[in-house]
Image: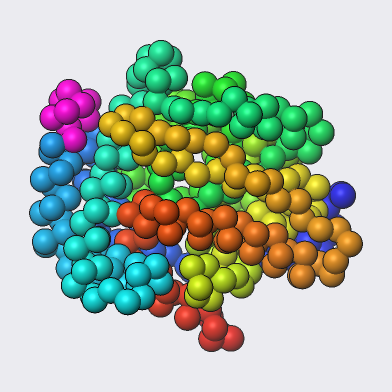
Amino acid sequence: MSESPRGLAEAILAERGALSSLRWTLHGLNNAVIFGAACRIVGALPPRLTYAVAQVSTWLGWRLMRRTRMAIAENLGAIFPHESLAARERRALDTLRANARDVVDFLRAITATDEWQRQLFDFDPEGARLFKTLLADGRGIILVSGHYGNWEIGSVLMRILNLPLTIVAMAEANPELNRRRREMREQLGVDTIEVRKSLDTALQIRRRLGDNRIVAMLMDRHFGRDRVAVTLAGRRAWFLKTPALMGLLTGAPLVPCFIERTGPSRFSAGPGDPIFVATDLPREEAIQRAAQQFADQLSVRLHAHPDYWYHFYPYWDSQQDCDNPSA
C-alpha cells in the first residue's frame, strides 16, 4: 500500500510532540561519563575481569542510586504483583547486573573479529531464511523490539547476516553520548535516523523501506503524541505508534526480535511471529491490533526473563500521564 498524505502528516506531527518527551533519557545511568568509563574499562581489561568490575559497580549503583532502584522495583510490580517492594528491590540488582553485562558484550563486539562476533549468537537458520523471504517481497522489514535484552548487539547480528539495517533512535540528551553511540553504529555499517534531529523521520523511514532495508525501532516507549494504547503484562500502556502506522502505509511486515543472554558472551537471537498490519479494518483499529500483537509477544518474554527489561525510570507512571488528554 502506498503512503497517504494524511498518514505521513500524522506521523510527522506526532514526532513534533516527541521533542518534549525526554525525561526517560535523563536517568542516572544515561550519561557520557559512565558510558565513557565503560568504554575504557572494556577496552583495557580481559572479559572475566570486566564482568567482575561490572558486578561490583552495579552493586554500588544499586545501593547508592535509590531512585533508580525504586523505579525498577515499581516497574516489576506488573510481573510480580504479589511480591513485596523489598523483594522487588532485590530483583532490581539482577536487572542492573544483566544490563551491565549486555553493555560489556556490546562494546567488546564492536571491534571484535568476525569469528568472535559469529560465536556470540545461537541463531536459528530459519530466522535468517525468514528475513530473506520477507525481503524478497521488496517492501523492507520493520524490526521491532522493546528495551529488553541486548537489543543493541542485534546490529552485530545483522552485520554477520549481511542484512541492511537502519536504526531509528531518539537522539541522546547529552551530545557527547549521542556522538559516541552514533559512531559505534557506523563502525558496524548501520545507518541511523535520529528522531530529534529531523522532522521528516516518517519520510526517511518510508525511503529506507522503499530501498528494501530493515528498519529497527524500539516500540515499548512512546514519544509524545506518537502513541497507541496496548495491554502489556496485564496493565495499560502506550507504545510507539509509528512502526504499525508505517507498516500500514507501506505493507512492510513488523518482525519482533528478542536477544537474550544464554551465557558469558553468548546470546540466543531470532525473530518472533511476523505481524502484518490489516488493510481490511478501520485504520486505527488495524494499528492498535498490530501494536497489541507485538505487546503480547513482549509480555511472554518479560515473564520469562523479567531481569532483561531495562527501564530505569518509573515506566508505569509515565503511562498514566498519557491518560491525561492534555499530555
Residue at x 51%, y 28% (from the top left corner): 123
Say whether residue 111 is left or right of residue 131: left
Question: In terms of secondary structure, what is the magenta stretch mainly?
Answer: helix
Evaluate whether residue 312 shows in this view.
yes
Q: Nearer the viewer, residue 4 or 249?
A: 249
29 lies above or below 143: below
Q: Percent position (x, y) of residue 264?
A: 28, 31
10 lies above or below 96: below
- The coloring applied to the image is rainbow
Say whether residue 94 is left or right of residue 134: left
Rendered image quadrant of residue 213: top right
Say whether residue 121 is left or right of residue 167: left
Asked if the stretch drawn in magenta spans residue 50, the answer is yes
197 lies above or below 65: above
186 lies above or below 256: above
Residue interval drawn in magenta? 41-51
Residue at x 41%, y 46% (from the top left corner): 149
Q: Percent position (x, y) of residue 229?
A: 61, 72
